[in-house]
Amino acid sequence: MPTLINQQYRLAARPVGAPRHSDWSFTSEPVRDIADGEIIVQTIYISLDPAMRGWMNEGKSYIRPVAIDEVMRAGGIGKVIASRSTKFKTGDYVCGGTGVQQYWAGAADDKAAAFHKVDPQLAPLPKYLNALGMPGMTAYFGLLDVGQPKAGETVVVSGAAGAVGQTVGQVARQKGCRVVGIAGGQEKCDFVVNELGFDACIDYKAGALREGLKQHCPDGVDIYFDNVGGEILDTVLTCINLKARIIICGAISQYNSTTPVKGPSNYLSLLVNRARMEGIVVFDYAARYGEAVAAMGQWMAQGKFQTREDIVVGIEGFPDALMMLFEGKNFGKLILQMGEE
């Protein structure tokens, strides 16, 4: 095999506020030879997720921060182009922690990468970074295990047109719930209702969130799946029912703030309504991913489940593509395409 040159994005500095181009270094290096038990994966798609902003910060969290000069952590899908392992053969498609780079080389059973095979015949590869990947697993287990929905309840989800939100709403519909989304812009709201099957969607950019919640949730909110935090979380808390469940998945409105994170001033609504607020970290459910993939895969095959991906082409565009998440510019699951399938 000729020498391969690996282009990579490494973390050069810890961002203050929104990440800047100077917070990254774009490097190139030869791909090393592999030893017994190792593989080389050529990356095809990279998952761009709001959680990546948190991984860039120093401090205690559910996962260690990315180190300075380390390849930026990211999930991805690639093709095994060289193998000295019995676990994967050349030509296999795998999903795991590729990082933001063109090639990954290392042990086939590397725990951090956690590669597993995916079948492009069963679903297009980008779907494995959306509903059949980490966002889908987050939505499925966050709603069902933490939210524990019951038929007839009202579920509200923010970031409804995004990767996690679109799956939350559709799973809730499969469980017989009334589903109300919150999204930014009429185009996204139309997609959420007309294509994903939500009962309603409120355009928060139109500035009438409280009125929209009163209109579309006349009996209150039983479950709120929060992806954005900030003022939207605070507003929804004023509408929750007795024994409501609030699932904290993310707080994208807060990630680039240079001031302390804004907590909900209406938190006493949890006390008054004897409600529960609980966080979801998808890695806690790793042993059960197959359960979610089987369920959603069946719904897809039956035409009951839709997904949308927003694919940006070219590794050089990674810094700007990542910022699309925080500027509301992506429409669906944001993915960076590195090369050809």
Image (cartoon, grey):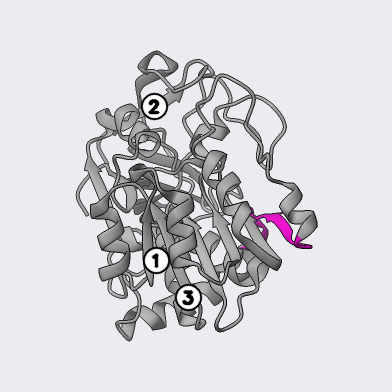
- Residue in view at x 30 percent, y 44 percent: 330
Report which residue position mark 2 lands on: 9
- Residue in view at x 36 percent, y 20 percent: 27
- Residue in view at x 44 percent, y 17 percent: 23
Towards the viewer: 224 or 52: 224
- Residue 245 image point, x, y percent: 67, 64
How crowded pointer 2 is (Cα within 10 Å; few <14, some 14-19, many 20+) is rated as: many
Q: Disc 3 marks which amino acid?
A: Arg
Q: Secondary structure at mark 1?
A: loop
Report which residue position mark 3 lands on: 178
How crowded pointer 3 is (Cα within 10 Å; few <14, some 14-19, many 20+) is rated as: many
Q: Disc 1 marks which amino acid?
A: Val
Q: Earlier in the sequence, mark 1 or mark 2?
A: 2
State the extent of the magenta-drawn residues as a range: 273-285
Above-or-below relation of 49 to 25: below
For the question of whether residue 132 can be seen, the reply is: no
Report which residue position mark 1 lands on: 118
Determine if the magenta segment contains residue 42. Answer: no
Q: Disc 2 marks which amino acid?
A: Tyr
